[in-house]
């Protein structure tokens, strides 16, 4: 189970950061349904070829500084 909770607004900010860091991703690759954080983590694991801990750490880091530009 994911150790974070996203809202549509916070996901938009995190998504922008993922798109900047992983330029080969497309907007369509990063779809998110409210309450489906676990599914999002699995999807991102496949897309960026990293493990679950890295994905969760990266999302939490982005949420900690939602207004910043860095991921």
Image: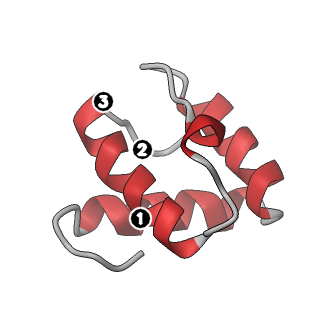
Q: Find residue 52 and report its image quarter.
A: bottom right
Density class for disc 3 (Cα within 10 Å; few <14, some 14-19, many ≥20) is few
Q: Is residue 28 visible?
A: yes
Secondary structure, mark 1, is: helix
Q: Residue 33 in the image: x percent, y percent?
A: 49, 20
Residue 56, disc: none
Q: Residue at x 26, y 65 (%)?
A: 64
> What is the secondary structure assignment of the residue under circle 3?
helix
The residue indicated by pointer 2 is: 4
Evaluate if marks 3 and 2 touch, with contact meaning CB atoms under 8 Å apart. Answer: no
> What's the distance in space between the residues labelled 2 and 1, CA to CA?
17 Å
| Residue at x 75% of width, y 62% of height | 48
Rate crowding at label 2 as few (under 14), some (14 to 19) or many (20 or more) other CA atoms within 10 Å.
few
Q: Would you name the residue on which mark 1 appears?
A: 17
- List the residue tagged with mark 3: 8
State the residue in front, 3 or 15. 15
Q: Position of residue 19 (x, y in %)?
A: 51, 61
One can see residue 1 in this view: no
For marks 3 and 2, give the CA distance.
13 Å
């Amino acid at each position: 189970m994911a150790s974070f909770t996203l809202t549509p607004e916070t996901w938009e900010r995190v998504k922008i950061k993922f798109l900047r860091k992983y330029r080969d991703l497309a907007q369509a690759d990063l779809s998110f349904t409210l309450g489906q954080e676990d599914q999002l983590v699995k999807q991102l694991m496949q897309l960026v070829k990293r493990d679950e801990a890295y994905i969760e750490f990266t999302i939490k880091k982005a949420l900690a500084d939602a207004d910043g530009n860095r991921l």
